[in-house]
Image: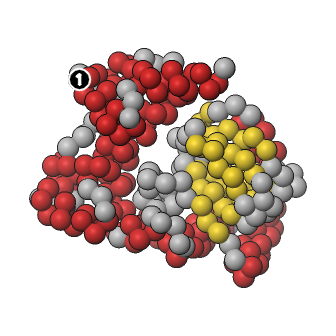
Amino acid sequence: MKTTTFTEFATDALLKIGDQQVLQEFDSPKQIGLYSFIWALESGVEIIVDSEPILLQANQILALTPIQYVQFNSGDALRVYQFNREFYCIKDHDKTVGCAGDLFFGNDFIPLVNLSQEEQEKFELLHQIFLEEMENQDRVQAEMLRMLMARFIIKTTRLLNAGDHPQQHKKKSDLLRKFNMLVETHFKNEHSVKFYAEQMFKSPKTLANSFSKFNSTPLQIIHGRIVLEAKRLLTYTDLSSKEIAYELGFDDPAHLSKLFKKNTGMPPSAFKASKETLSI
């Protein structure tokens, strides 16, 4: 299918619907730049996300945020939906679609949604309505497309939370979702549990006790997000370990190095060297 694009001059909104051709420019790793859903109609789609290889099976949907680095290696029979913040703001509409911290910005795993035969039929119908609406260039087109995207997001979020992913039990708490979103917003400048507890009107001890059922702690989530960003910067930029430390809010680069080694088993310099060796 050809790529169809909706743009809105007044808001700079952008929505694209296409196939594997949309991903051809990602033959080498780079930030995807848009919120993206990649729906594999057939198995064997090979994609690398933040240096992690992913093999999409038939009727799996992968959700990506604009900041993630993507490399498309191979695959046919894809459907790709992409949109920017101006078209549909995930954070502003979270009360409606409830996906922030789950489908997007969860940070502890890359979300894959599995479609049953019944769900395939429902998503196929939704896709056809999308395509019809892309052709209707009238004054309500933008609102209709946003409503359709909201439905797509709600359906994929529900399926994600109903799935058997080993992390899914962690994803059913509004407390954890809110915490993930706060960390996503502030992790470069705020590294203490105290800051996030205050934002949630709780004491650090109360917050920690609330997280006990998630087999994780608030500090582990904060550190995990910092390490994830450090990995991205080490893998995909020419910044030095010291520059990355400053970028992530550390006055002393040694503090990031210690944290990174604790989480990955190697210092940042060794991690960067390992990635450079793989790319040769």
Relative to 273, residue 215 above or below: below
Provide the secondary structure element on which disc 1 rests: loop
118 relative position to 159: left or right: right
Taking depth in this image into account, of 171 and 213 the one nearest to the observer is: 213
Relative to 270, residue 27 above or below: below
User: What's the coloring here?
Assistant: secondary structure
- Residue 6: x, y in percent? 72, 53
Instruction: Note whether residue 126 is visible.
Output: no
Which residue is rendered at x = 54% and y = 54% of the image? 110
Q: Residue furthest right?
A: 1
Taking depth in this image into account, of 198 and 216 the one nearest to the observer is: 216
- Residue 7: x, y in percent? 69, 49
- Residue 278: x, y in percent? 62, 26
The amino acid type found where label 1 is placed reads Asp
Quadrant of the image containing the N terminus: bottom right
Which residue is rendered at x = 73% and y = 54% of the image? 80
Relative to 95, residue 266 above or below: above
Q: Give the total of numbered labels.
A: 1
Q: Residues within 10 Å of mark 1 (few under 14, many from 20)?
A: few
273 relative position to 142: left or right: left
Q: Give the residue at mark 1.
A: 251
Instruction: Note whether residue 67 is visible.
Output: yes
Which residue is rendered at x = 35% and y = 40% of the image? 263
Taking depth in this image into account, of 267 and 143 the one nearest to the observer is: 267
- Residue 133: x, y in percent? 76, 66
Taking depth in this image into account, of 53 and 123 the one nearest to the observer is: 53
15 relative position to 44: left or right: left
Which residue is rendered at x = 55% and y = 58% of the image? 111
